[in-house]
Image (tube, rainbow, N blue to C red):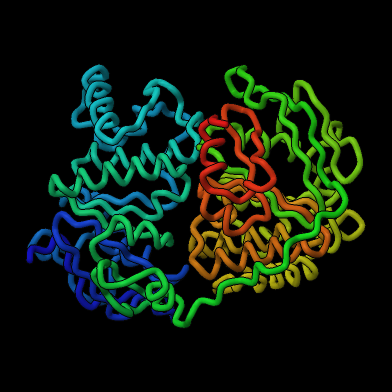
Amino acid sequence: MSFAVRLLGITKRFGTVTALDRVDLEVEQGAIHALVGENGAGKTTLMRVLYGAIAADEGSMEVEGNTVRFGTSREAIEAGVGMVSQHYGIIPELTCLQNLILGAEGGLVLKNKVAEERAQSLAARMGFTFDWHAEASTLSPAGAQKLEILKLLWRNARIMILDEPTAMLSPADAAALFESLHRLANEGATIILVTHRLPEVLDHCSRVTVLRGGRRIDEKLVVDTNGNELATLIVGEAIVEPDRSQPFEPGTTLLQITGLVVKGDHGEQALKEVNLTLRSGEVLGIAGVDGSGQRELFEAIAGLVQTQHGSMQMLGSDCLSWDAAERIRNGLRLIPEDRHAQGVVEDWSLDENAALGLQRLAPFANKGRVDGKARFEMAEQIADRFKTKRGGLKLPMSSLSGGNQQRFVAARALCLNAKLILAFQPARGLDIKGTQQVYDGIREACRNGSAALVVSFDLDELLEQCDRVVAMNNGKLLEPRAQDSLDRDAIGRLMVGAQ
């Protein structure tokens, strides 16, 4: 058996915390190997050791049969190891082409035409499409993820580490990505897939390694395991399915949208005569491929974009004249799509981030001034709500893993009498338990009189977690028949515009 990667006895400590405890990982050449575990299990830390971003305190590494010890990520890249992390390295002001080749230009003089031809060839190989001259700021999160993956091919990576690569991709884009990954593996590339999505493991990987609490718990051939066994290994106990036996009872209308028209970034109609009714007690999911208008609908409800036509009533009042702050004062709460750009300030402490967007509300504000003691107490409640693993509330948000940041942002949205919850990919980067906790929290708020509008590119997640699901296609909101409100095939047809 030929191994592309062998990590033996890898140990990494951060102060008094042991993030990795004598972890072994062996990955066959040409395989798609899954690495799974809860948030904070050590998956990303282990991959950052392999990528040279951090140094292990103990242990040894072999890459393609050679003993290595990378001091920097550049050394890892030169050895054929590339990594796409959950945190994109895209510079918004540069073009897509400039971002692709940044740091790997290949000489003092850049031949733009040659570079673009190679970029186009690599994109076609993966089934991606880009406007190479457009600024990267125009990319959706899914587009940014695709560009990050292309960076690995540009740098001739033979060992590709993908950390939650489908978290922001539509089902169709995810399927296309895995088709490309299988093609790359057949050509000899080795892919390490860090994921929380067990169906991806079962459908696309040959082996799976499970980490828990910084230790390797088990490694299995995928053909010898199943989703229930993996979930139990990941969590350490059997997963109890939530009780869905009691249907929701819709109450008063909390959001009424009629004939809403919103223009996109290029002047096109991004929302086309959208009609939507959301009642208290209800968790309503919006399915659709990325770019179908979900983002513009979310921003219109939040008061972040101007509407051209239509009406919107929130909590019984005409809200189109309200700015975002006024909507928050009236009970609107947000779990944003991109927590880094819209949900947290990573250099700020956890207790400062607890008040972000809510700083004008009690108890954060007292007679127009910040109440530091109350903010700290609320931050503790928010962090405890979904068991955010943290070192201390005065530490910067950047000290948390991506999944724990998401837990914190989701919990913050459910505090202070949330009445209308807008959640865009609320389970992004969360493990099995974290996903269930967040959705249980959303559902609990709704059963107590709130309402939630949830956008996700994972249709199965919406069908499992929501009371009913509608679809968006080309700026239009399409509702299935009442009896098909949770029918996968019916909603799937609406997602592509078929009635």
- Whether residue 469 is visible here, answered yes or no, is yes
Q: Give the camera-side residue of 233 and 142.
A: 233
Q: Quadrant of residue 499?
A: top right
Q: Quadrant of residue 225?
A: bottom left
Q: Give the camera-side residue of 369 and 472.
A: 472
- Whether residue 336 is visible here, answered yes or no, is no
Q: Give the camera-side residue of 34 and 26.
A: 34
Residue 82 appears left or right of 6: right
The quadrant of the picture occupied by the N terminus is bottom left
Q: Give the camera-side residue of 345 and 144.
A: 144
Relative to 307, say whether 188 is above or below: below
* Rendered location of residue 194, percent (x, y): 35, 60
Q: Residue drawn at (15%, 52%), measured in percent from left and top?
A: 79
Q: Residue drawn at (32%, 65%), measured in percent from left and top?
A: 35
Residue 147 appears left or right of 190: right
Q: Residue drawn at (64%, 33%), measured in percent from left and top?
A: 296
Q: Residue drawn at (58%, 52%), measured in percent from left and top?
A: 462
The outermost residue toward the front is 483
Relative to 317, say whether 209 is above or below: below
* Rendered location of residue 62, percent (x, y): 14, 65
* Rendered location of residue 67, percent (x, y): 11, 65
* Rendered location of residue 271, percent (x, y): 66, 27
Q: How many marks?
A: 0
